[in-house]
Image (tube, rainbow, N blue to C red):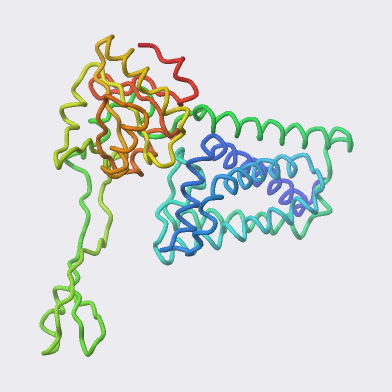
Amino acid sequence: MISLKNALTQFSRIFVGILFIISGLIKLNDPLGFSYKLAEYFSEPVFNLPVFIPFALAIALFLVILEVILGVMLLIGYQSKLTICSLLLLIIMFTFLTFYSAYFDVVKDCGCFGDALHLTPWQSFTKDIILLFFILILFFNQKLVKPLFSNRVQNSLAIISFILCAFMGYWVINHLPLKDFRPFQVGNNIQKGMRIPDNAPKSIVEMVFIYKVNGVDKEFTEKDLMSIPEGATFVDRKDKVIVEGYVPPIHDFGMEKDGSDYKEEFLDKPKLMLFVAYDLTLSDKKGMSELEKLKQTASAKGYTVIGMTGSSPEEIAKTKKQFGFTFDFYFCDAIALKTIERANPSVVILEKGTVKQKVHYNDIEDLKL
Protein backbone atom coordinates (compact mmCIF):
# COMPACT_ATOMS: atom_id res chain seq x y z
CA MET A 1 0.00 0.00 0.00
CA ILE A 2 1.36 3.40 -1.01
CA SER A 3 1.90 5.75 1.92
CA LEU A 4 0.45 9.26 1.94
CA LYS A 5 3.97 10.74 1.86
CA ASN A 6 4.92 8.70 -1.18
CA ALA A 7 1.64 9.50 -2.95
CA LEU A 8 2.12 13.24 -2.34
CA THR A 9 5.73 13.04 -3.54
CA GLN A 10 4.78 11.24 -6.77
CA PHE A 11 1.95 13.71 -7.40
CA SER A 12 4.38 16.60 -6.88
CA ARG A 13 6.83 14.95 -9.25
CA ILE A 14 4.25 14.64 -12.03
CA PHE A 15 2.67 18.06 -11.41
CA VAL A 16 5.95 19.99 -11.29
CA GLY A 17 7.53 18.05 -14.16
CA ILE A 18 4.61 18.55 -16.54
CA LEU A 19 4.17 22.22 -15.62
CA PHE A 20 7.86 22.97 -16.20
CA ILE A 21 7.78 21.19 -19.56
CA ILE A 22 4.65 23.05 -20.69
CA SER A 23 5.93 26.42 -19.48
CA GLY A 24 9.34 25.85 -21.06
CA LEU A 25 7.98 24.66 -24.42
CA ILE A 26 5.59 27.62 -24.69
CA LYS A 27 8.48 30.03 -24.15
CA LEU A 28 10.79 27.95 -26.38
CA ASN A 29 8.18 28.37 -29.12
CA ASP A 30 8.94 32.13 -28.94
CA PRO A 31 12.31 32.72 -27.25
CA LEU A 32 12.62 36.19 -28.76
CA GLY A 33 9.42 37.20 -26.99
CA PHE A 34 10.80 35.89 -23.69
CA SER A 35 14.08 37.74 -24.32
CA TYR A 36 12.11 41.00 -24.64
CA LYS A 37 10.60 40.27 -21.23
CA LEU A 38 14.06 39.62 -19.73
CA ALA A 39 15.33 42.86 -21.27
CA GLU A 40 12.46 44.60 -19.46
CA TYR A 41 13.68 43.13 -16.16
CA PHE A 42 17.26 44.24 -16.96
CA SER A 43 16.14 47.79 -17.86
CA GLU A 44 16.86 50.85 -15.73
CA PRO A 45 13.35 51.18 -14.16
CA VAL A 46 13.51 47.60 -12.82
CA PHE A 47 16.91 46.11 -11.88
CA ASN A 48 19.09 48.59 -13.79
CA LEU A 49 21.35 45.92 -15.30
CA PRO A 50 21.74 47.15 -18.89
CA VAL A 51 24.98 45.17 -19.30
CA PHE A 52 22.84 42.00 -19.62
CA ILE A 53 20.43 43.34 -22.26
CA PRO A 54 22.63 42.33 -25.25
CA PHE A 55 22.67 38.78 -23.86
CA ALA A 56 18.91 38.59 -23.20
CA LEU A 57 18.26 36.13 -26.05
CA ALA A 58 21.07 33.79 -24.99
CA ILE A 59 19.85 33.88 -21.37
CA ALA A 60 16.27 33.30 -22.53
CA LEU A 61 17.28 30.23 -24.56
CA PHE A 62 19.30 28.84 -21.67
CA LEU A 63 16.46 29.27 -19.16
CA VAL A 64 13.67 27.83 -21.32
CA ILE A 65 15.73 24.81 -22.40
CA LEU A 66 16.71 24.29 -18.76
CA GLU A 67 13.03 24.38 -17.75
CA VAL A 68 12.10 21.67 -20.25
CA ILE A 69 15.12 19.47 -19.50
CA LEU A 70 14.58 19.68 -15.72
CA GLY A 71 10.92 18.79 -16.21
CA VAL A 72 11.86 15.73 -18.26
CA MET A 73 14.60 14.72 -15.81
CA LEU A 74 12.17 14.98 -12.89
CA LEU A 75 9.54 12.82 -14.60
CA ILE A 76 12.01 10.03 -15.47
CA GLY A 77 13.86 10.32 -12.16
CA TYR A 78 17.21 11.20 -13.72
CA GLN A 79 19.83 12.52 -11.26
CA SER A 80 17.01 13.29 -8.83
CA LYS A 81 19.11 15.16 -6.25
CA LEU A 82 20.69 17.49 -8.83
CA THR A 83 17.37 17.92 -10.64
CA ILE A 84 15.34 18.80 -7.54
CA CYS A 85 17.99 21.19 -6.19
CA SER A 86 18.14 22.92 -9.58
CA LEU A 87 14.35 23.22 -9.65
CA LEU A 88 14.38 24.68 -6.16
CA LEU A 89 16.97 27.32 -7.07
CA LEU A 90 15.05 28.16 -10.25
CA ILE A 91 11.69 28.54 -8.52
CA ILE A 92 13.22 30.68 -5.75
CA MET A 93 14.59 33.01 -8.44
CA PHE A 94 11.26 33.10 -10.29
CA THR A 95 9.34 33.71 -7.05
CA PHE A 96 11.58 36.65 -6.20
CA LEU A 97 11.13 38.14 -9.68
CA THR A 98 7.34 37.80 -9.67
CA PHE A 99 7.06 39.19 -6.13
CA TYR A 100 9.26 42.15 -7.08
CA SER A 101 7.15 42.76 -10.21
CA ALA A 102 3.90 42.58 -8.26
CA TYR A 103 4.94 44.58 -5.19
CA PHE A 104 6.67 47.40 -7.08
CA ASP A 105 4.34 47.19 -10.10
CA VAL A 106 7.21 47.35 -12.62
CA VAL A 107 6.58 44.43 -15.01
CA LYS A 108 2.93 43.88 -15.91
CA ASP A 109 3.32 40.35 -17.24
CA CYS A 110 6.16 38.02 -16.23
CA GLY A 111 5.91 36.04 -19.46
CA CYS A 112 5.73 32.71 -17.60
CA PHE A 113 3.56 31.22 -20.34
CA GLY A 114 4.53 33.57 -23.17
CA ASP A 115 1.59 34.99 -25.11
CA ALA A 116 -0.44 31.80 -24.63
CA LEU A 117 -1.62 32.80 -21.15
CA HIS A 118 -1.24 36.24 -19.63
CA LEU A 119 -1.03 36.37 -15.84
CA THR A 120 -1.05 39.44 -13.64
CA PRO A 121 2.04 39.87 -11.42
CA TRP A 122 0.18 38.67 -8.33
CA GLN A 123 -1.23 35.66 -10.21
CA SER A 124 2.31 34.79 -11.33
CA PHE A 125 3.59 35.12 -7.77
CA THR A 126 0.78 32.87 -6.47
CA LYS A 127 1.62 30.28 -9.14
CA ASP A 128 5.27 30.31 -8.07
CA ILE A 129 4.37 29.94 -4.39
CA ILE A 130 2.30 26.84 -5.26
CA LEU A 131 5.18 25.43 -7.29
CA LEU A 132 7.61 26.22 -4.46
CA PHE A 133 5.39 24.25 -2.06
CA PHE A 134 5.43 21.12 -4.26
CA ILE A 135 9.15 21.41 -5.02
CA LEU A 136 9.86 21.59 -1.27
CA ILE A 137 7.93 18.35 -0.87
CA LEU A 138 10.23 16.82 -3.47
CA PHE A 139 13.29 18.35 -1.81
CA PHE A 140 12.51 16.77 1.56
CA ASN A 141 11.59 13.42 -0.01
CA GLN A 142 14.29 13.05 -2.64
CA LYS A 143 14.83 9.36 -1.86
CA LEU A 144 11.29 8.61 -3.01
CA VAL A 145 12.00 9.95 -6.51
CA LYS A 146 13.29 6.77 -8.16
CA PRO A 147 14.50 6.45 -11.79
CA LEU A 148 12.01 4.87 -14.19
CA PHE A 149 14.57 3.35 -16.55
CA SER A 150 18.12 2.02 -16.65
CA ASN A 151 21.03 4.48 -16.62
CA ARG A 152 21.61 4.00 -20.34
CA VAL A 153 18.00 4.80 -21.23
CA GLN A 154 17.93 7.73 -18.77
CA ASN A 155 21.08 9.24 -20.33
CA SER A 156 19.68 8.79 -23.82
CA LEU A 157 16.36 10.45 -22.95
CA ALA A 158 18.11 13.43 -21.34
CA ILE A 159 20.43 13.91 -24.34
CA ILE A 160 17.60 13.54 -26.87
CA SER A 161 15.51 16.09 -24.95
CA PHE A 162 18.37 18.58 -25.06
CA ILE A 163 18.99 18.06 -28.78
CA LEU A 164 15.29 18.47 -29.64
CA CYS A 165 15.01 21.63 -27.52
CA ALA A 166 18.15 23.13 -29.06
CA PHE A 167 16.87 22.39 -32.57
CA MET A 168 13.46 23.88 -31.78
CA GLY A 169 15.11 27.04 -30.45
CA TYR A 170 17.30 27.33 -33.56
CA TRP A 171 14.33 26.78 -35.87
CA VAL A 172 11.92 29.32 -34.39
CA ILE A 173 14.58 32.02 -34.19
CA ASN A 174 15.46 31.59 -37.87
CA HIS A 175 11.88 31.12 -39.07
CA LEU A 176 8.61 31.70 -37.17
CA PRO A 177 7.11 30.37 -33.93
CA LEU A 178 5.50 26.97 -34.51
CA LYS A 179 2.31 28.31 -32.93
CA ASP A 180 1.43 32.00 -32.97
CA PHE A 181 -0.45 33.10 -29.85
CA ARG A 182 -0.24 36.84 -30.55
CA PRO A 183 -3.18 39.08 -31.57
CA PHE A 184 -1.63 39.54 -35.06
CA GLN A 185 -1.76 35.84 -35.90
CA VAL A 186 -2.86 34.77 -39.38
CA GLY A 187 -6.64 35.05 -39.70
CA ASN A 188 -7.07 37.86 -37.16
CA ASN A 189 -8.44 41.25 -38.16
CA ILE A 190 -6.53 44.27 -36.86
CA GLN A 191 -9.54 46.61 -36.76
CA LYS A 192 -11.51 44.12 -34.66
CA GLY A 193 -8.53 43.67 -32.36
CA MET A 194 -8.42 47.42 -31.67
CA ARG A 195 -12.12 47.79 -30.84
CA ILE A 196 -13.33 48.39 -27.30
CA PRO A 197 -16.79 46.86 -26.61
CA ASP A 198 -19.50 49.29 -25.48
CA ASN A 199 -19.96 47.42 -22.19
CA ALA A 200 -16.23 47.07 -21.48
CA PRO A 201 -15.11 48.16 -18.00
CA LYS A 202 -13.56 51.62 -17.93
CA SER A 203 -10.39 52.56 -16.13
CA ILE A 204 -10.71 54.48 -12.88
CA VAL A 205 -8.15 57.25 -12.91
CA GLU A 206 -7.23 59.66 -10.13
CA MET A 207 -5.55 63.00 -10.84
CA VAL A 208 -2.43 63.59 -8.75
CA PHE A 209 -0.91 67.04 -8.39
CA ILE A 210 2.76 67.45 -7.51
CA TYR A 211 3.82 70.54 -5.56
CA LYS A 212 7.21 71.48 -4.23
CA VAL A 213 6.88 72.06 -0.49
CA ASN A 214 9.96 73.30 1.37
CA GLY A 215 12.12 72.05 -1.46
CA VAL A 216 10.54 68.56 -1.54
CA ASP A 217 8.11 67.26 -4.19
CA LYS A 218 4.87 66.06 -2.59
CA GLU A 219 1.80 64.52 -4.18
CA PHE A 220 -1.76 65.69 -3.55
CA THR A 221 -5.01 64.18 -4.81
CA GLU A 222 -8.03 66.31 -5.71
CA LYS A 223 -9.50 65.96 -2.23
CA ASP A 224 -6.21 67.15 -0.71
CA LEU A 225 -5.97 70.38 -2.72
CA MET A 226 -7.31 72.53 0.12
CA SER A 227 -4.50 71.28 2.36
CA ILE A 228 -1.68 72.48 0.08
CA PRO A 229 0.39 74.88 2.21
CA GLU A 230 0.93 78.46 1.19
CA GLY A 231 4.10 79.06 -0.77
CA ALA A 232 4.03 75.61 -2.39
CA THR A 233 5.01 75.64 -6.06
CA PHE A 234 3.16 73.58 -8.68
CA VAL A 235 5.49 71.11 -10.43
CA ASP A 236 3.40 68.66 -12.45
CA ARG A 237 0.16 66.75 -12.78
CA LYS A 238 -0.21 63.06 -13.54
CA ASP A 239 -2.96 60.48 -13.82
CA LYS A 240 -2.80 57.50 -11.46
CA VAL A 241 -4.70 54.40 -12.58
CA ILE A 242 -6.65 53.02 -9.61
CA VAL A 243 -8.45 50.26 -11.53
CA GLU A 244 -7.28 49.12 -14.97
CA GLY A 245 -10.10 49.03 -17.52
CA TYR A 246 -10.43 46.91 -20.65
CA VAL A 247 -7.37 46.99 -22.88
CA PRO A 248 -7.98 45.70 -26.44
CA PRO A 249 -5.65 42.94 -27.69
CA ILE A 250 -4.21 45.35 -30.26
CA HIS A 251 -3.26 48.81 -29.02
CA ASP A 252 -0.57 51.41 -29.70
CA PHE A 253 -0.86 50.47 -33.38
CA GLY A 254 -0.45 53.24 -35.91
CA MET A 255 0.83 54.04 -39.40
CA GLU A 256 2.10 57.57 -38.93
CA LYS A 257 3.94 59.83 -41.31
CA ASP A 258 4.45 63.60 -41.18
CA GLY A 259 2.15 63.94 -38.18
CA SER A 260 -0.79 62.01 -39.69
CA ASP A 261 -2.02 58.48 -39.03
CA TYR A 262 -2.90 56.53 -42.17
CA LYS A 263 -3.98 53.24 -40.60
CA GLU A 264 -7.66 53.57 -41.56
CA GLU A 265 -6.69 54.16 -45.18
CA PHE A 266 -4.17 51.32 -45.38
CA LEU A 267 -6.18 48.79 -43.37
CA ASP A 268 -9.03 49.18 -45.87
CA LYS A 269 -6.87 48.11 -48.82
CA PRO A 270 -7.56 44.65 -50.33
CA LYS A 271 -3.88 43.96 -51.05
CA LEU A 272 -1.35 45.42 -48.62
CA MET A 273 2.21 44.24 -48.03
CA LEU A 274 4.03 45.38 -44.91
CA PHE A 275 7.76 45.25 -44.33
CA VAL A 276 8.04 45.29 -40.53
CA ALA A 277 11.39 46.34 -39.01
CA TYR A 278 10.96 47.56 -35.44
CA ASP A 279 14.53 48.95 -35.34
CA LEU A 280 16.36 49.66 -38.58
CA THR A 281 19.73 49.84 -36.82
CA LEU A 282 19.29 46.21 -35.66
CA SER A 283 17.67 44.81 -38.81
CA ASP A 284 19.31 41.93 -40.65
CA LYS A 285 21.22 43.31 -43.64
CA LYS A 286 20.69 40.22 -45.77
CA GLY A 287 16.97 40.33 -45.09
CA MET A 288 16.77 44.05 -45.86
CA SER A 289 18.54 43.55 -49.19
CA GLU A 290 15.69 41.26 -50.32
CA LEU A 291 12.90 43.77 -49.76
CA GLU A 292 13.18 46.06 -52.79
CA LYS A 293 13.06 43.14 -55.23
CA LEU A 294 10.00 41.76 -53.40
CA LYS A 295 8.40 45.21 -53.49
CA GLN A 296 8.74 45.38 -57.28
CA THR A 297 7.22 41.90 -57.67
CA ALA A 298 4.32 42.70 -55.31
CA SER A 299 3.60 46.10 -56.90
CA ALA A 300 3.35 44.43 -60.32
CA LYS A 301 0.64 42.19 -58.85
CA GLY A 302 -1.40 45.11 -57.48
CA TYR A 303 -0.13 45.27 -53.90
CA THR A 304 0.37 48.47 -51.98
CA VAL A 305 3.76 48.13 -50.29
CA ILE A 306 4.94 50.10 -47.25
CA GLY A 307 7.49 49.72 -44.48
CA MET A 308 6.75 50.03 -40.77
CA THR A 309 9.34 50.92 -38.16
CA GLY A 310 9.88 52.51 -34.78
CA SER A 311 13.09 54.20 -35.96
CA SER A 312 13.71 57.93 -36.39
CA PRO A 313 13.20 59.84 -39.68
CA GLU A 314 16.98 60.22 -39.93
CA GLU A 315 17.50 56.47 -39.69
CA ILE A 316 14.70 55.87 -42.20
CA ALA A 317 16.36 58.23 -44.73
CA LYS A 318 19.73 56.56 -44.19
CA THR A 319 18.27 53.06 -44.66
CA LYS A 320 16.32 54.00 -47.81
CA LYS A 321 19.49 55.38 -49.36
CA GLN A 322 21.61 52.38 -48.28
CA PHE A 323 19.30 49.76 -49.79
CA GLY A 324 17.73 51.83 -52.59
CA PHE A 325 14.18 51.45 -51.24
CA THR A 326 11.42 53.00 -53.35
CA PHE A 327 8.71 52.48 -50.72
CA ASP A 328 7.92 54.73 -47.75
CA PHE A 329 8.25 53.86 -44.08
CA TYR A 330 5.49 54.64 -41.59
CA PHE A 331 6.09 54.99 -37.87
CA CYS A 332 4.61 52.60 -35.30
CA ASP A 333 5.51 51.93 -31.68
CA ALA A 334 8.41 49.45 -31.62
CA ILE A 335 6.72 47.26 -28.98
CA ALA A 336 3.64 46.91 -31.20
CA LEU A 337 5.87 45.99 -34.15
CA LYS A 338 7.68 43.35 -32.07
CA THR A 339 4.25 41.89 -31.32
CA ILE A 340 3.34 41.71 -35.01
CA GLU A 341 6.37 39.60 -35.82
CA ARG A 342 9.67 38.75 -34.16
CA ALA A 343 11.87 38.82 -37.27
CA ASN A 344 13.56 42.11 -38.11
CA PRO A 345 12.59 42.51 -40.93
CA SER A 346 9.50 40.40 -41.57
CA VAL A 347 6.84 40.45 -44.28
CA VAL A 348 3.11 40.63 -43.54
CA ILE A 349 0.26 40.43 -46.07
CA LEU A 350 -3.05 42.08 -45.17
CA GLU A 351 -6.45 41.98 -46.86
CA LYS A 352 -8.68 44.76 -45.58
CA GLY A 353 -6.92 44.57 -42.21
CA THR A 354 -7.00 40.77 -41.93
CA VAL A 355 -3.63 39.05 -41.64
CA LYS A 356 -3.30 36.58 -44.52
CA GLN A 357 0.39 35.67 -44.44
CA LYS A 358 3.47 36.32 -42.31
CA VAL A 359 6.99 35.22 -43.10
CA HIS A 360 10.48 35.56 -41.65
CA TYR A 361 13.02 37.22 -43.94
CA ASN A 362 14.58 33.77 -44.34
CA ASP A 363 11.32 32.45 -45.83
CA ILE A 364 10.41 35.13 -48.39
CA GLU A 365 10.23 32.45 -51.10
CA ASP A 366 7.26 30.91 -49.23
CA LEU A 367 5.08 33.97 -49.91
CA LYS A 368 2.06 33.34 -52.12
CA LEU A 369 1.10 36.52 -53.98
Going by the image, does 205 lie left or right of 69?
left
Q: How many marks?
A: 0
Up-down relation of residue 368 to residue 289 (above or below): above
Give the image location of residue 268, x and y in percent. 18, 23
Up-down relation of residue 206 to residue 180 (above or below): below
| Image quarter (top left, top right, bottom left or bottom right) of the N terminus | top right
Up-down relation of residue 62 to residue 276 (above or below): below
Determine the image quadrant of residue 271.
top left
Determine the image quadrant of residue 327.
top left
Which residue occupies the foreground of this view, 62 or 296? 296
Which residue occupies the foreground of this view, 368 or 27? 368
Going by the image, does 167 lie left or right of 202?
right
Identity of the residue drawn at 84% across and 53% down? 143
Identity of the residue drawn at 30% across and 30% down? 307
| Image quarter (top left, top right, bottom left or bottom right) of the C terminus | top left
Determine the residue located farthest toward the top in the rendered image.
301
Which residue occupies the foreground of this view, 351 or 124? 351
Give the image location of residue 160, x and y in percent. 75, 31
Going by the image, does 62 lie left or right of 141?
left
Give the image location of residue 78, x and y in percent. 81, 43
Up-down relation of residue 267 to residue 61 (above or below): above
Give the image location of residue 39, x and y in percent. 48, 52
